Structure formats: structure tokens, C-alpha cells
């Protein structure tokens, strides 16, 4: 490009975008749902003038990114679960980025040691119990769900779901493979029915009296409590929330993350980093709690009032990458015990 053309391009950019940057957009591949991510993107565009384009999908985006190779339009990947983020890194689909803002906002145990992915929010896997039928003082730890006392009284979604696989990985990390498998076997022995349904369906099953105890992600409690469906509000009213492993010497409740990274062949890398930085900052971190009952990943930001109202759990501080690394072993145990 000669100097004359460059000057013309800069003038066009100033006229149209009011800035000197040549491309004012960022393309996002998102496993996160529109209701959640749109308010963040609107705010980002308002503040930076950078336009966002989003491809939403519940699955298959990593394969798509891989297949597209150099020609991929993707700049930013947003997803939930450390196992899924790890797949992107494992397939070399993420670009290492050097951002002082991200390194300051996101604690080291919640980001990739290679600086390829960063947690943006946290969620805790919690125990719910029937208010009528379970004495909450009897359940203090996730390990307690293996007690024979609960035989035929526990409901669960399939163990191979990423949320349960990550939980299983955390139990292996804390207790070792042998004890973890013993726990899983006894847990499965306690099931009231074949593992089925999503997290919400477990609360419904308690409401209907099919079982008394289940494990869910904390935000589903909020989603049910404030659901537009009055039935779902009733389900939430029938359960107590228990944050497991909260004792003084205990490790804290297992947490998982939502997070993001920059696509390896991003053509708008600066804007991609700006978006991740924005998502790790105060405005966005407050939104995660308000919109979806998730905890901020940035420790400088307080959780939402609603979350504080339920009690803020002590968290298992294990480097979250360990949960991903133990994922395959967790899955083998889950298969062996038939969870
Ligand atoms: Fe979920």
C-alpha cells in the first residue's frame, strides 16, 4: 500500500469509525448462550466502538475452527468448562497472549500456564437436599454422598457430563485414584434411578419425591428460583443448598469456570484481547452474577447480592488445569462404576 492509499484508508476509518484502527470488529465463536453474552457485547461495543459478530453453537466449534485452519474468521472463543477450554489448547487452536490486564484480573490458578485461556467466571458444584426429608447437618462433604445411609435417595445426571467429570477429577486430585473410585462406586450404589436429565431435572426429581439429594451447579438454583415458569420456582423452594467441603481443614467446594481465549489465526488480535480484557473487568464481572448467578473470576469484584445471600463458599484452590488433565482418568472411573 502506498502512502497516498494509506492516508485515504485512515481518513475513511476516521469518518466511519471515529478511530484510527483499520478493522473495528471482532468475531466470536461462542458456546455461551445469546441471552448471557449479548449484554456484555453491547456494552463492549458502546465503550470501544468495536463491532462484534457471533457464531453460537452448543457443540462442534472446536472442530469447525480446526477445519477452517488459516481461513477461520474467528478471533475469540468463549465457552464453559475447563475440559472444553483445554481441548482448544490441546489442539493448538489458541494463541498465547501477553496481557497485563488479564494477568492482573485473573488469578494464576484460573488461567492457562501458557496464557492461552483465561477464566471469566466461576461456578460451584453444590449439593441440594430435600428440605423436608434430609437433615442438612448430616452432609458436610461431597464424600458424604457415598454413605450407605443415602441408599436409594440420590439423583444424578450422567457422570460423563462435563460438570460431573470435572467434579470426579477434583475428587481424584484430593483423595487419589483408588479412594476416588471407591467413592464413585458407593455414590452410584446410592442412586434412586438411572443417571438422567440435566441439573434442573435433579431438583425437579427431589420436588416430585423421586429422591432426596442431588448435585447441581449453583447458578441453576438461581435460574429456578427466578424462572418465568412458576413450577420451576416451586422446585427451588423444596431444596436446601449445601456447599460441600467447607470445614476448616477441608479443601473447599469444587469450582469450574467459563472462560475464553484468542483464536490461533485471529485477524483482529488486538480487538480480541481488548474483548477478553473487558470481560475480565469490573463491568462484565458484575454482569456474570446479575445475569446468570455466576461468581466473578476477578477477585477484586464482589459477587452479586443474590449470591452473597446464599453464602459464598470456600473454594478448592487447585490449579484448574489439573481438573482438565485428570479428565480422562475421571471418565474411565465413571465408565467403570457405571455412573
Ligand atoms: Fe450449565
Image (spheres, helix red, strand yellow):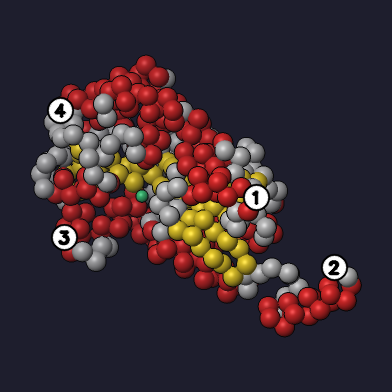
Label pair 4/2, CB-CB below 8 angstroms = no
State the separation of the CA atoms marked 4 and 1.
Answer: 54 Å
Which of the two labelled residues, at mark 4 and mark 3, occupies the earlier sequence position?
4
Q: Is mark 3 within 8 Å of ligand 1?
A: no
Query: Disc 1 marks which residue?
Result: 70
Give the residue number, with chain letter if any, for mark 4: 151
Instruction: Quickly name the residue at label 2.
Output: 1
Total label count?
Answer: 4
On the question of residue 105 being in view, the answer is: no
Separation of disc 1 and disc 2 at Cα? 23 Å
In this rendering, position of residue 269 left or right of residue 209: right
Marks 4 and 1: which is nearer the front? 1
Distance of label 3 from label 2 (alpha carbons): 63 Å
Q: Is residue 307 left or right of residue 30?
A: left
Question: Does the CB distance between marks 1 and 2 fall below 8 Å?
Answer: no
Determine whether the residue tagged by mark 2 lies in a helix, strand or loop: loop
User: Does the beta carbon of the residue at mark 4 sit less than 8 Å from ligand 1?
Assistant: no
Q: Earlier in the sequence, mark 1 or mark 2?
A: 2
Q: Are marks 4 and 1 in contact (CB under 8 Å)?
A: no
Q: Would you name the residue on which mark 3 appears?
A: 231
Of marks 4 and 2, the one in the foreground: 2
**Where is residue 279 shown, x and y percent of the image?**
55, 59
Cα distance in 3D space between marks 4 and 3 = 28 Å
Instruction: Decide if residue 30 is in sight here.
Output: yes
Assign a secondary structure to mark 4.
Answer: loop
Compare marks 3 and 1 and give the one earlier in the sequence: 1
Distance (Cα) linking label 3 and label 1:
48 Å
**Mark 3 or 1, which is nearer the eye?**
1
Mark sitting earlier along the chain (3/2)? 2
Instruction: Farthest residue to the left: give it.
Output: 209
Q: Quadrant of residue 177?
A: top left
Amino acid at each position: 500500500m502506498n502512502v497516498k492509499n494509506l492516508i485515504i484508508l485512515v481518513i475513511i476509518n476516521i469518518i466511519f469509525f471515529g478511530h484510527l484502527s483499520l478493522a473495528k470488529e471482532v468475531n466470536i465463536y461462542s458456546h455461551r448462550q445469546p441471552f448471557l453474552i449479548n449484554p456484555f457485547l453491547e456494552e463492549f461495543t458502546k465503550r470501544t466502538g468495536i463491532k462484534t459478530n457471533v457464531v453460537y453453537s452448543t457443540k462442534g466449534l472446536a472442530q469447525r475452527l480446526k477445519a477452517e485452519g488459516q481461513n477461520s474468521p474467528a478471533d475469540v472463543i468463549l465457552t464453559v468448562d475447563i475440559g472444553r477450554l483445554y481441548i482448544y489448547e490441546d489442539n493448538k487452536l489458541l494463541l498465547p497472549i501477553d496481557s497485563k490486564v488479564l494477568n492482573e484480573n485473573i488469578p494464576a490458578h484460573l488461567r492457562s500456564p501458557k496464557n492461552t485461556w483465561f477464566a471469566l467466571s466461576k461456578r460451584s458444584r453444590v449439593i441440594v437436599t430435600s428440605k423436608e426429608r434430609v437433615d442438612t447437618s448430616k452432609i458436610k462433604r461431597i464424600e458424604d454422598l457415598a454413605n450407605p445411609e443415602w441408599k436409594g435417595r440420590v439423583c444424578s445426571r450422567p457422570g460423563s457430563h462435563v460438570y460431573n467429570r470435572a467434579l470426579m477429577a477434583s475428587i481424584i486430585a484430593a483423595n487419589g485414584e483408588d479412594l476416588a473410585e471407591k467413592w464413585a462406586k458407593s455414590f452410584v450404589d446410592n442412586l434412586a434411578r438411572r443417571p438422567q436429565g440435566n441439573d434442573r431435572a435433579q431438583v425437579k426429581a427431589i420436588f416430585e419425591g423421586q429422591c432426596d439429594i442431588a448435585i447441581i451447579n449453583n447458578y441453576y438454583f438461581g435460574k429456578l428460583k427466578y424462572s418465568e415458569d412458576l413450577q420451576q420456582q416451586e422446585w427451588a423452594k423444596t431444596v436446601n443448598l449445601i456447599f460441600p467441603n467447607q470445614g476448616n481443614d477441608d479443601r473447599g467446594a469444587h469450582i469450574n469456570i467459563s472462560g475464553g481465549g484468542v483464536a490461533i489465526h485471529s485477524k483482529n488480535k488486538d480487538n480480541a484481547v481488548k474483548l477478553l480484557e473487558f470481560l475480565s473487568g469490573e463491568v462484565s464481572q458484575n454482569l456474570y452474577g446479575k445475569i446468570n448467578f455466576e461468581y466473578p473470576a476477578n477477585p477484586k469484584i464482589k459477587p452479586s447480592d443474590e449470591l452473597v445471600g446464599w453464602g459464598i463458599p470456600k473454594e478448592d484452590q487447585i490449579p484448574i488445569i489439573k481438573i482438565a488433565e485428570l479428565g480422562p482418568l475421571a471418565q474411565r472411573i465413571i465408565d467403570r462404576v457405571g455412573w
